[in-house]
Amino acid sequence: MSVHSFKAVQCIPVSLQEAWAFFSSPVNLQAITPPDVHFRVTSTLHGESIYPGQIIEYKIKPLWGIEWYWMTEITHVEPGRYFADEQRYGPYSLWHHQHHFKEVPGGVEMTDIVHYKIPGRWLGDLVAGRLVEKKLQQIFAFRFKTIEGLFGKYP
């Protein structure tokens, strides 16, 4: 039973304040998620910006059109620097997602670090190694292109 990890880095030609305002709003997550995942935020009490202890609920169809209920909690927030969310209920045995922001010349470097574990022991590891990692790569590739479309290409 392995814990898998995934890292994505993207530079965005905006101010740190603009990047933080966009990415710390739960409403914007749907806009940067591929349509084939059928991701939608279903909670209505999440507020304008993230805060520690915040619960966000979603419905997703990540694989084979099967709908999943997913609940995450924002566990850590340091405004303008990072925030982390952890799954409280959903398809993973473990889901921990860190979002880091750092000013760089001409914009912001955004780094996502995900640690996850699939239920099912060795079968879960097999699935994670093939299907889930490929899906995460597709989701973050879509996110990269969408963010470039929204904010422009980093020089």
Image (cartoon, rainbow, N blue to C red):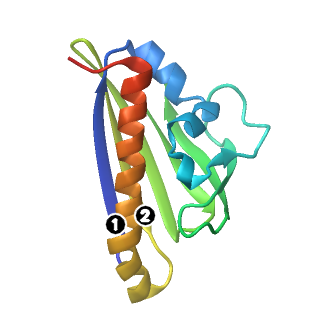
* Amino acid residing under circle 1: His
Image quarter for residue 131?
A: bottom left
Please report the residue visible at 46 percent of the width from the left and 15 percent of the height from the top. Answer: 18
Tell me the element at label 1.
strand
Q: Is residue 81 visible?
A: no
Is residue 87 toward the left or the right of residue 98 in the image? Answer: right
Q: State the image coordinates of residue 29 (x, y, percent, origin top left).
A: 56, 37
Q: State the image coordinates of residue 120 (x, y, percent, origin top left).
A: 49, 84
Residue sitting nearer the eye, 40 or 23: 40
Tell me the element at label 2.
strand
State the residue lying farthest toward the bottom: 122
Please report the residue visible at 72 percent of the width from the left and 36 percent of the height from the top. Answer: 46
Q: Point out which mark residue 131 bears.
A: none
**Split into 4 quadrants, where in the image is the N terminus?**
bottom left
Do residues under tags 1 and 2 come within 8 Å of each other at their CB atoms? yes
Image quarter for residue 44?
A: top right
Q: Which residue is mark 2?
A: 116
Task: Give the Cα separation between the discs numbered 1 and 2.
Answer: 5 Å
Q: Which residue is mark 1?
A: 4
Is residue 111 positioned above or below 93 on the image? above
Is residue 134 toward the left or the right of residue 49 in the image? Answer: left
How busy is the neighbourhood of tag 1: few (under 14 within 10 Å), some, or many (20 plus)? some
State the residue lying farthest toward the right: 44
* Amino acid residing under circle 2: Tyr
Nearer-N-terminus badge (1/2) = 1
Please report the residue visible at 42 percent of the width from the left and 44 percent of the height from the top. Answer: 98
How busy is the neighbourhood of tag 2: few (under 14 within 10 Å), some, or many (20 plus)? many
Please report the residue visible at 58 percent of the width from the left and 43 percent of the height from the top. Answer: 74
Q: State the image coordinates of residue 111 (x, y, percent, origin top left).
A: 32, 37
